[in-house]
Amino acid sequence: VQLQASGGGLVQSGDSLRLSCEASGRAPNSCYMGWFRQAPGKEREFVAAISANAYIPYYADNVKGRFTISRDNAENMVYLHMSSLKPEDTALYYCAAGYSSVKINFTSLRAYPYWGQGTLVTVSS
């Protein structure tokens, strides 16, 4: 699976932004998809994920209620709608994907063998 993330930019605190991730290659609609982010000097962290078929969303506590993950399997797209953005949301955002027929930990980086390039989100105060 190849992933192409886009939609990052410079916004002000309180603004909204939508990130997009286009998936291509082998059966992208069968993948579970995730968004991770990495701020300067920090480790990459889980943001949100969505299951392949039931579209069940999962969120990190620090974005719950502000971010929404969605997918459009007809277009092979996954989105991350971000609202009420804060300066601490500033990071390089990555989309990731994986296949599994068993229950996995969606919050773990190890669950995702496929990664796109990052898209930079900068939130000014």
Image: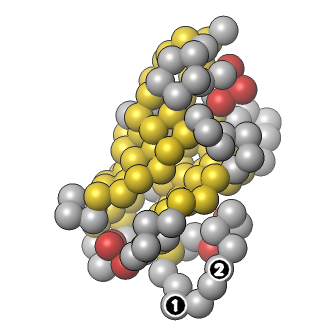
Please state if 22 lies on the left or on the right of 31 as rendered.
left
Vertical arrangement, residue 73 with respect to residue 101, above or below: above
Q: How many marks?
A: 2
Quadrant (top left/top right/bottom left/bottom right) for the N terminus: bottom left
Please state if 40 lies on the left or on the right of 37 as rendered.
right
Please state if 40 lies on the left or on the right of 85 as rendered.
right
Amino acid type at circle 2 is Ile
Amino acid type at circle 1 is Ser
**Mark number displayed over residue 16:** none
Q: Residue at x 64, y 28 (%)?
A: 90
Image location of residue 15, percent across then percent down? 51, 17
Separation of residues labelled 1 and 2 (CA atoms)? 9 Å
Q: Mark 1 = which residue?
A: 101
Q: Can residue 92 be seen in this view?
A: no
Vertical arrangement, residue 104 with respect to residue 69, above or below: below
Image location of residue 106, percent across then percent down? 64, 68
Image location of residue 93, percent across then percent down? 55, 42
Q: Name the secondary structure under disc 2.
A: loop
Q: Nearer the viewer, residue 104 or 44?
A: 104
Vertical arrangement, residue 81 with respect to residue 87, above or below: below
Q: Quadrant of residue 7?
A: top left
